[in-house]
Amino acid sequence: MTISALALGTSSLAQTAATDTTVLEVQVSGPTRDAAYGQAIGKGIEALVARVLTPGTPAYTQTVAAIPRNEVRLGRVVREGTGAGGVTMTVEISAARGLVERAVLRAQPGLAQTRIAVIIPEVILRRPVPDPAAETEIGRSLVESGLRLVDASQQVLNATREIVRGSPSLNAQALAELRTRLNADLLVTGEAFAEEYGAVAGGLRGYTARLEVKVIDLASGQVLSTQAFQGSAAGATDAVAGKTALMNVGKAAGALLPGKIIGALQGAGTTAPRAYVMRAGPPVTFAQLNALGTRLRGSSTVGAFTIRSVDQAGAVAELQFTGSVTELAALLESLGVQVSGLTGSEITVRF
């Protein structure tokens, strides 16, 4: 029996803003209809995991094996054909949104410690929105996927929104200030706006919304992901229609962002080494740090290593590393350094 899936990177994928379900299509084949149909769940799981992790990697294989088959459902047969080799069909598969992301985080709990802030200024008819709808939907999706959202006060959130509005390009100074104020590793930001496109049936107001969102590593300033979303809604008033349109584009972004973030934390899709902060508890000397830096620079995965401070309270260093924080932890322990804690972009060690 031969079984083939649709190209995993280009599988037909539908994620509606109205549901919390991911639906995709997989192609399977076998000598009989039942034999082909019976392979669809396995291929569906592989296609779901391939949206987050690179096929063939250990993390991908482990996650495929860890997802219970009863959490993925078979749907309708979209297309079917017969030939000399038997039956080939395309089957619809559905699963709860966040299924893969939660499975990855269960297997690698260190990734779940990444501190993520969501700051997306929103505008309806050129007026700032005090309680952003798209930002709320994205935050909800991240939490439901098992990721750690920064719980900042309203005062801090308002101040950081002003920083984002005042510096759309987010220069190094703005990024440093955001990292300090939010105590976060990653920032999900961008801009969202809604505007009227006219009256619709029933006397309702029609609004369209656009969301441009990017994920930024606050330590290095590297943009890990960027994407735009567009949607629409209708409501009895301008405020209701505009907020609903913004909520819909937020849901669309929230369906994809957890997977993008987890993939980036795994080292997938990055274009340059990430910057990590290493904090060493006392006692530690400059000589110990310098010797460790020399050994680290001998690895092909490590770039610059800079010692920021050494004093009685410990030491702080910054290094560039191609890979995830868990891979960095493994490298440090292989060099005889004890790792006592980690988050998305920080690692705590003892000599």
Image: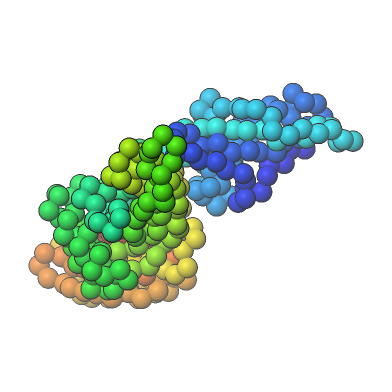
- Residue 279 at least partly seen: no
Give the residue drawn at x 50%, y 40%: 15
Residue in the picture at 50% in, 48% down: 52
Q: Position of residue 214 (x, y in %)?
A: 38, 59
Colouring convention used in this rendered image of the protein: rainbow
| Residue 43 picture location, percent across and down | 63, 37
Residue in the foreground of this view, choosing between 337 and 218? 218
Residue 8, above or below 180: above
Q: Is residue 90 left or right of residue 125?
A: right
In this rendering, position of residue 276 left or right of residue 32:
left
For the N terminus, the quadrant is top right
Classify residue 308 by image quadrant. Answer: bottom left
Quadrant of the rendered image containing residue 228: bottom left
Identify the image quadrant of the C terminus.
bottom left
Q: For the point 16% across and 72% down, which residue is it?
A: 310
Vertical placement of 175 versus 42: above or below?
A: below
Rendered residue at 26%/70% (across/down): 167
Give the image location of residue 180, x and y in percent: 18, 62
- Indicate left or right for 39 with 177 as reference: right
Q: Nearer the viewer, residue 190 or 69?
A: 190
Q: Position of residue 245 (x, y in %)?
A: 38, 45
- Looking at the image, which is closer to me, 245 or 1? 245
Snapshot quadrant of residue 275? bottom left
Q: Nearer the viewer, residue 193 or 259?
A: 193
